[in-house]
Image (cartoon, rainbow, N blue to C red):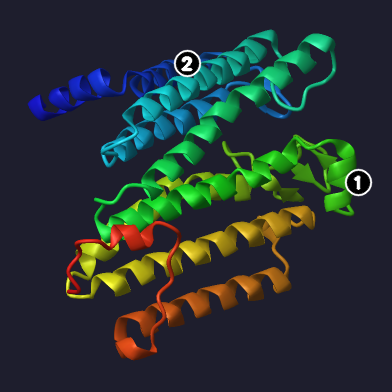
Amino acid sequence: MHGFRELVIESWQQHRPLVVIVMYSLCCLTVSASGLAFDHKVIAGENAWIKPCKFSISLATYGLTLLWYSRFLTQHQVLMRRMSVAAMVGTIVELSTIIIQVLRGTTSHFNTSTTFNHVMFWITTSAIVPVAFALIALFVMLLREKNLHPVLGAALRWALLITIVGFIPGVLMILPDRLQDAITCYKQFDGHTIGFSEGGPGIPFLGWSTVAGDLRIAHFVGIHALQVVPIIGMLIDVGLPRLKSSRQQMLVSIFALSYLILIALLTGQALSAESLFSSSTHSILIAAGLLAVGLCAVACTIWSPSASLCKLTIPGDAAADIGKSPN
């Protein structure tokens, strides 16, 4: 408990905006959870407080994750603080507008029914921009870090790169109609749902469509690479301690590339108006092929002679290898 208190104090002193992100998100989560329990109004076919709950959880996780990432930065502290302030403002505006619209009894996203609702939608969309750009800035900063542990450093860089790519399905949701029509042949492109009107049948809480394409799935998988990939990197480092560092990094790269392909497959499936929960045989075969190739690549990396391996890297990995022993 004493160590946790010291960690909180240190985080507050060094990265106050990120702590505010976490605290404000948790406050909004408390309000939203109370709404779920006591206010049973329905908006767009689901409990009105589910959306602010989801966004509060996501942004609290975002803030906690960036606090952890910031511990690996030994330079660019001023840029990190400025980036954190921008992300903090974006988070506060984002969650506030969502809750305001819930209290008004209407949706916050894709709502252009009145001038006021259109403005609120524009504010909500704009508020997430600094949150996303903070990750781009952090990615650039970590590329310049030369003292990171090679395996964890590779995982952190890949995680940020994949998360940035994971914002693309989110961008597709808010494109003008003419651009959306150019991307998919399905004219019924309603926000995040393709091939069916928004607010149709979906799984509990997350609301992902069970009858049509849904870009939220690819977006969700993409942005949570921020947590998943570093965890995989740490598991590789701890679970395969006798494997050479170069091979450990290659395992991270194999997982990261497979993750990127998965995001592309989920995005393509959504744009084809196909629900993940009623996947076609074609989609299932592609996913099975990806899994098989990935497992083969992992097996070859662990057990094949080193002469037959070619290293997969992303920019900055070479710098991260400095000072790392070959074993």
Residue at horizontal 82%, vertical 20%? 112
- Label annotation for residue 187: 1
Residue 293 image position (x, y, % from top left)? 51, 79
Q: Give the amino acid type for the residue marked by disc 1 in the picture.
A: Lys
The numbered mark, 2 or 1, whose residue comes first in the sequence reads 2
- Label annotation for residue 253: none
Q: Is residue 45 left or right of residue 87?
A: right
Quadrant holding the N terminus: top left
> Does any portion of residue 73 appear in the rendered image?
yes
Rendered view: 292 above or below 183: below
What is the distance, in whole Å, between disc 2 and disc 1 at their CAs? 38 Å
Rendered view: 254 above or below 150: below
Q: Report helix, strand or loop for mark 2.
A: helix
Quadrant holding the C terminus: bottom left
Residue at horizontal 22%, vertical 70%? 240
- Label annotation for residue 34: 2
Q: Give the amino acid type for the residue marked by disc 2 in the picture.
A: Ser
- Between 320 and 177, the one nearer to me in the picture: 320
Q: Residues within 10 Å of mark 2 (few under 14, many from 20)?
A: few
Residue at horizontal 83%, vertical 52%? 183
- Between 114 and 89, the one nearer to me in the picture: 89
Residue 90 image position (x, y, % from top left)? 54, 21
Q: On the image, which quarter does residue 126 sit in? A: top right
- Between 162 and 218, the one nearer to me in the picture: 162
Q: Is residue 237 left or right of residue 41?
A: left
